[in-house]
Amino acid sequence: MTEAIHRYSVLCIALAVLISSTVCLAEEPKQIDAKRIYNNNCAKCHGRFGKPTKRGKRLGAPNFSSRFWQVSVTNEQIIDAITYGKNKMPGWRKVLTTEEIKAAARWVRVLSPRKKR
Ligand code: HEC
């Protein structure tokens, strides 16, 4: 009798773990990889390290690796330009989600030159 109860409770725990882990997996948001988003969508004009490519230069893309450029724009301007586009730059609101656009904007800041110490 006690053994039956014991076996039953073990089964219950196993079932509970199984259910909760599948629920957790289902609810976990898609992992956003800022670098990958940037390299896949932006690097063809802006370059992997923020220096514009030939194509980007021709279109008038700025140099993200310049400290002067970095201090000249706000995060809002960066997100706005990515979302809606700016002059020769296409907008990305139909291609990327809001979260992905924010991640790309974060990556543009990562390309900022490091402060000299
Ligand atoms: C087809 C080439 C092209 C692609 C692809 C492209 N851009 Fe641009 N981007 C430009 C050009 C050209 C400008 C300069 C716009 C201007 O100021 O006239 C620019 C400007 C910008 C700016 C500066 C906006 C400002 O306010 O000065 C940011 C930030 C930016 N791009 C981010 C991105 C990100 C992030 C991606 C990828 C999701 C991307 N760009 C993809 C061409 C491109």
Image (spheres, rainbow, N blue to C red):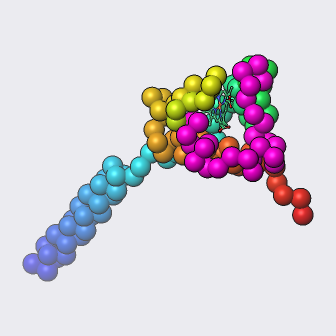
Residue nearest the viewer, comparing 3 with 15: 15
Examine the residues drawn in magenta and state their main secondary structure.
helix
| Vertical position of residue 87 compared to residue 18: above or below | above
Question: Is any atom of residue 46 visible in this view?
Answer: yes
Q: Looking at the figure, which quarter contains the N terminus?
A: bottom left
Image coords of residue 103 (percent x, y): 57, 45
Image coords of residue 89 (percent x, y): 62, 26
Q: Residue at x 63, y 36 (%)?
A: 38
Q: Residue at x 64, y 31 (%)?
A: 42
Quarter of the view holding residue 60:
top right
Q: Looking at the figure, which quarter contains the C terminus?
A: bottom right
| Boundaries of the magenta span | 57-82
Split into quadrants, the picture shows ligand 1 in the one at top right
Q: Residue at x 29, y 60 (%)?
A: 20
Image coords of residue 66 (percent x, y): 82, 43
Image coords of residue 33 (percent x, y): 57, 44
Quarter of the view holding residue 90:
top right
Q: Position of 7 compared to 24: left or right?
A: left
